[in-house]
């Protein structure tokens, strides 16, 4: 989840590098990265050796190879993405995603 917020922030800074975007999305990136490290530290203190075993089996960053194994989740995610990017235009008054190009037609 925190990786998703980090990617969201990076994507927004890349496509709209204004001062307000850098401050807001940069804050989200910092909160996601620092917060997730803080959560890991808390779990390590609470669970000790068991947490270290768990961390060896998982990764702090998402593994790109796992994205190909999602199968039908991509099919379900596409309409959700379309809806969210459409709502971005309605709520933020800024087109996003596919709607950027459709607006230009």
Image (tube, rainbow, N blue to C red):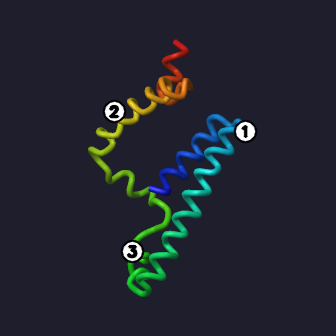
- Please give the residue where the numbered disc 2 appears in the rendered image: 79
Crowdedness of circle 1 by 10 Å Cα count: few (<14), some, many (20+)? few
Name the residue rendered at 53%, 23% in the picture. Answer: 100
Q: Which residue is mark 3?
A: 57
Work out how far the residue at label 2 is from the one at label 1, CA to CA, in angstroms: 31 Å
Q: Which secondary structure, mark 1?
A: helix
**In the shown orientation, is residue 58 left or right of residue 5?**
left
Disc marking residue 5:
none
Q: Earlier in the sequence, mark 3 or mark 2?
A: 3
What residue lies at 57% left-to-right and 61% top-to-bottom?
Answer: 33
Q: Report the mark closest to the observer, 2 or 1.
A: 1
Q: Position of residue 13 (x, y in %)?
A: 64, 41
Tell which circle, 1 or 3, labels the residue nearer the N-terminal end.
1
Residue 80, quarter of picture: top left
Q: Residue furthest right?
A: 19
- Name the disc covering residue 19, or none: 1
Observer-nearest of 42 and 3: 42
In this picture, is 73 found above or below 66? above
């Amino acid at each position: 989840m925190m990786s998703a917020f980090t990617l969201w922030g990076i994507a927004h800074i890349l496509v709209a590098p204004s001062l307000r975007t850098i401050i807001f999305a940069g804050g989200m990136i910092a909160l996601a990265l620092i917060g997730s490290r803080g959560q890991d530290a808390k779990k390590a203190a609470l669970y000790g050796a068991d947490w270290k075993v768990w961390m060896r089996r998982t990764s702090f960053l998402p593994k790109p190879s796992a994205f190909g194994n999602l199968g039908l989740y991509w099919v379900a995610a596409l309409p959700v993405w379309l809806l969210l990017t459409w709502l971005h235009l309605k709520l933020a008054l800024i087109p996003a995603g596919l709607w950027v190009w459709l607006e230009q037609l």
